[in-house]
Image: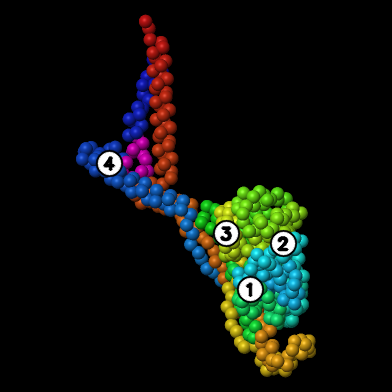
Amino acid sequence: MEAEKTQEQKPSIKELLDTFAGYSTLHGLHFLADASSYVRKLIWFLLLCSATAIFVYLAYWGWTKWRKYEVFVTTEIKINDVSSLPFPAVTICNKNMMKRSRIRGTDSQRYLDALDNMRSYKKYSQMMNSSFNIEQAVLENGHQLKDMVKGCFGPEPCGEFDHFFDTLSGLCYTFNGNGSFKLKKKGASFGIRLLLDAEPDEYYGRLKRDGIGLSVMVHDQNTQPTSELDGFDIPTGFATNFILKRKEIIRQPAPYPSKCGEIKLQTRKTYSETSCFWEKHTIKSLDKCGCRILGMPAIVKFVTKLNKFIKEHLKPSSQMIRTSKVWLQPNEKDNKVLLDGKNHYMCVSIFRVDPILRISYVRNAYHSYSAYVSAHITFDPKECPPPCNTVKYDIKTSSLIYPSRDVLENAPDNIKSMYKSSNGTNISFHDWYRSRFAFVNIFFHSADTEVMREVPAYDFVDFAAGFGGNMGLFLGCSVLTLLEFIDILVVITFEWYRKKQRNVQTFSVKPR
């Protein structure tokens, strides 16, 4: 009997809710429970509902703003000592691919003629030898470093230059590719100075119509440059100053819009967006076409489907198939650039509009082939995310007429002998010098580094602060108040379950 009395004294669910309304830190809830007037209860009920609705709306707004992952960009200046500032890599390319004097009557000449829109491509392409290799031809017949760079002057020895192949320019040379060279002071008097020889008498092919000069690229050591996208054209007869300011760009990874990151590349140890584009483009080109254009990296372990493609996508009656019965033969060992000389220009002539992202055709005669390639050699740019940390250089250029009279009077003997051996009697030494040489001075204007940093515009901390602030402003409570509701829900559930079990036991012992 005593146990039953004790059980009957347990509070009911309504009593639990009334008690909770009295001690809850949710403002206004106890007025709703204790108000003696129904009008007063209705007023507080409407006020609580309105405040809750506003809070829910603002909480949802904060949630959606957070999930947009927007960023804003901050700019700060990092003060450095110039001696500790990394000096960039400098790449030099001649605007001409191969020397006229070395390619006369060879497959290299016929190769350039086949790519020239103003010449008969059929005539020259059919005369090319099947063993022709464009990389080897450019390496042997391109402008050599010792001929193109006549002088390199700086506070320290310039060191070695590395070479690579550029799609448009052929042989290019990179100074300070390993980042070992550094300047001790800033200013024009303490930069790296280069005397460059364009060798205009050696120009040949379609590109010579663009003008005479050189392409200079200033870039970070981890970046793969391309003359078409990154090059500054330097004319002969001028001294050009490259005034540098270092810039760092720090991006946010996914899910923020930049989605920065890195992937492992097969062809380079260091990652850059351009290198990734080239590698992906090369893989697609080798897989679909069985060829890679000059400047693309060599990738092994590819089984191409080129012969099948030709049979399926080129008309059997086409002039190319009637006149050239040798299929394109890929070299799986090192992916030589289109080994079949007669058809070599087919691959290289279609990559023209954008050397990285797009493929387009130049020769209308191969419209069907190029259209197929344009439709199939594509990849999602998201496959090559931008690096989270990128170093770039803001470059300003200024020019002076070069050379001065003093430079001419003190010209080295080797340059004077070059003038004498190049039929110099028909042109003055000054005009000959101006038509051939360019002077470049590369230096830091400031040792400071501009840092552009992406910062989340509204992150989780902002969302939590806004959520808590709105909760306190409109409901007068905190996160602990939410725990109070969880606590009373657990108590009510337990009490309901206990009463249900007691009713079951009472029913089971009821006398007959």
Tell me which residue sits at (72%, 75%) in the image: 99
Tell me which residue sits at (26%, 43%) in the image: 46
Quick one: label 3 or label 4, which is nearer the N terminus? 4
Residue 378: quadrant of the picture:
bottom right
- 20 drawn magenta: yes
Q: Position of residue 81 (x, y in %)?
A: 65, 75
Q: How many marks?
A: 4
Q: Position of residue 168 (x, y in %)?
A: 65, 69
Quick one: label 2 or label 1, which is nearer the N terminus? 1
Task: Mark 2 and mark 1 in contact? Answer it, CB < 8 Å.
Answer: no
Question: What residue would you read off at disc 1?
Answer: 207
Tell me which residue sits at (71%, 71%) in the image: 109
Helix, strand or loop for disc 4: helix
Q: Given the image, on which type of amino acid does mark 2 rest?
A: Gly
Alpha carbon distance from label 3 to label 1: 22 Å
- 323 drawn magenta: no
Helix, strand or loop for disc 1: helix
* Nearer to us: label 2 or label 1: 2
Task: Mark 3 and mark 4 in contact? Answer it, CB < 8 Å.
Answer: no
* Nearer to us: label 3 or label 1: 3
Alpha carbon distance from label 2 to label 1: 21 Å
Q: Given the image, on which type of amino acid does mark 1 rest?
A: Leu
Quick one: label 3 or label 2, which is nearer the N terminus? 2
Alpha carbon distance from label 4 to label 2: 87 Å
Q: Given the image, on which type of amino acid does mark 3 rest?
A: His
Residue 341's disc number: 2
Q: Nearer the viewer, residue 107 or 293?
A: 107
Residue 45's disc number: 4
Q: Nearer the viewer, residue 219 or 345?
A: 345
Question: What residue would you read off at disc 3?
Answer: 367
User: Which segment is the magenta one?
Assistant: 19-29
